[in-house]
Amino acid sequence: EAERVSKEERQAWIEKDRQYVWHHMLPYAASQNPLIITKGDGAWVIDLEGNRYLDAMSGLWCVNLGYSNRELAQAAYEQLLQIPYYPMTQSHLPAIQLSEKLNEWLEGDYRIFFSNSGSEANETAFKIVRQYHAQNGEPTRWKFISRYRAYHGNSLGALAATGQAVRKQHYEPLAPGFVHVPPPYCYRCPFGKSRDTCEIECASIFEQVIQWEGPDTVAGVIMEPAITGGGVIVPPPEYMQQVREICDRYGVLLIADEVICGFGRSGKSFGHQNFAVKPDVVTMAKGITSAYLPLSATAVRADLFNAFKDEHAYAHFRHVNTFGGNATACALSLRTLELMEEMELVARCEELGQRMQERMMSLVDHPLVGDLRFFGLIAGVELVSDKETKTPASPEIVGRILAACKSRGVLIGKNSDTVPGQNNVLTLAPPLIITDEELDLIVRVLQEALQEVHFI
Ligand code: PMP
């Protein structure tokens, strides 16, 4: 049973929150009246007063198994009693078992380096890729290419890879050596093309940029299989394959950022598997533990790891993080993946994604809906004030729709800050354990919210 407190008691907690807690991301005013969540129940969260909300964003795209899975709690508890932690300069059984399991899911031969967050997994990837090239006789390869609109993390390297101007304001200078290209954004094609005649210029631009930068200076490309937080931007099916070919042609390594798209979310084990591409490096976090504990991983093609075996004194990867590969987090992660296999959740996610897409097609004619985009169990609803001119809907309209959903007990999201005036994509990424009825409820509530806001 969730704790229920009176309005006065809640207010007292809010006052303390205002006094002590620094919230992530939100402008000051928007952070003044947070939900105070005390309990979870499957896809639902319950606040201090006992109000229930259906979490259509799985927290921050991560609580894939829902909030109240006792088997995950049990796996963590048992590991805590066994050995809670030991540094990854040595090893422990949960790390070994999880690394083997991740290789099964990746359908490849990868060495796994554990960290704690998606940002750290990406930082780790950048350092490994730079050092690999140096040890492979190409020390001038140090640049990375990523896409505008994509998010890769909050640290100074991962933020440099991020293609969202607003996120960088006040924090520059960031790490040097990051170059951006336009995203595969068909609804607003950066090249002014249309899909039937475009020849996927958003992919061939990588070749141009590699040539312009000087191929012997480019170390890697980092991309999410579909841009998620940056507005659910799903590429044409051939796109990632074409980028892979360009990388191969120029000796550039391909890093797949699977922090959101991984672990079934896309309808495959990993997002890149939708495009029959093998990345050189795969970074993952969030769903790896269903967010019950912090853990992330950087998976590196085993033959690249060979470059780090050299007997030279500094050939090894001189990188450590205290908590990375925490034994309890690894044990919990392993149980997460086993449960997903037992429940056949990856296939279920594909089915749910199709259902969501079918149901959401009913929104397509709504005057505020400019574009609908889907990737597995992720949806993006790009809102416009005018369908003809595609003028982005104002932040006020977007905010009113989010509030209208919340007042009906459904929490949905919107894309992260990209450039001012373009935070107009509603996002949905419900837990993979959601029922058909719950999924239909989300779509119904979204429809009502759009109606309410449009006819004010
Ligand atoms: N990459 C992607 C694609 C992400 O969505 C995120 C987080 N939203 C990150 C990296 C960074 O992960 P973290 O917040 O765990 O550092």
Image: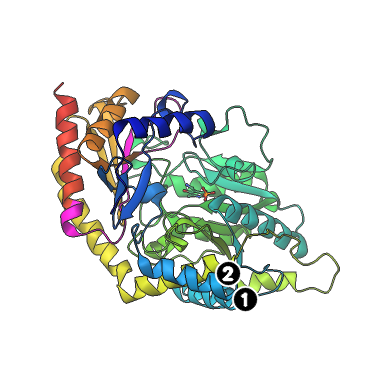
Q: On the rendered image, what quadrant is the C terminus found in?
A: top left
Residue nearer the viewer, 120 or 177: 120
Image spot of residue 360 (x, y percent): 18, 46
Magenta-highlighted residues: 414-439
What residue is pinned by disc 2?
327
Residue 321 located left or right of residue 437: right
Disc 1 crowd rating (10 Å Cα; few below 14, some 14-19, many 20+) is some
The answer to whether any part of residue 233 appears in the image is no
What residue is pinned by disc 1?
92
Residue 351 located left or right of residue 179: left
In this rendering, is residue 55 above or below 74? above
Q: Earlier in the sequence, mark 1 or mark 2?
A: 1
Instruction: Please name the amino acid that badge 2 sits on.
Output: Ala
x 27%, y 29%: residue: 384
Cβ atoms at labels 1 and 2 below 8 Å apart: yes
Give the SS element for disc 1: loop
The answer to whether any part of residue 359 appears in the image is yes
Kindly give the residue lying farthest to the right in the view shown. 313
Image spot of residue 204 (x, y percent): 49, 49
Residue nearer the viewer, 123 or 208: 123
Image spot of residue 7 (x, y percent): 30, 32
Give the SS element for disc 2: helix
Residue nearer the viewer, 65 or 353: 65
Dominant SS type (magenta) = loop
Disc 2 crowd rating (10 Å Cα; few below 14, some 14-19, many 20+) is many
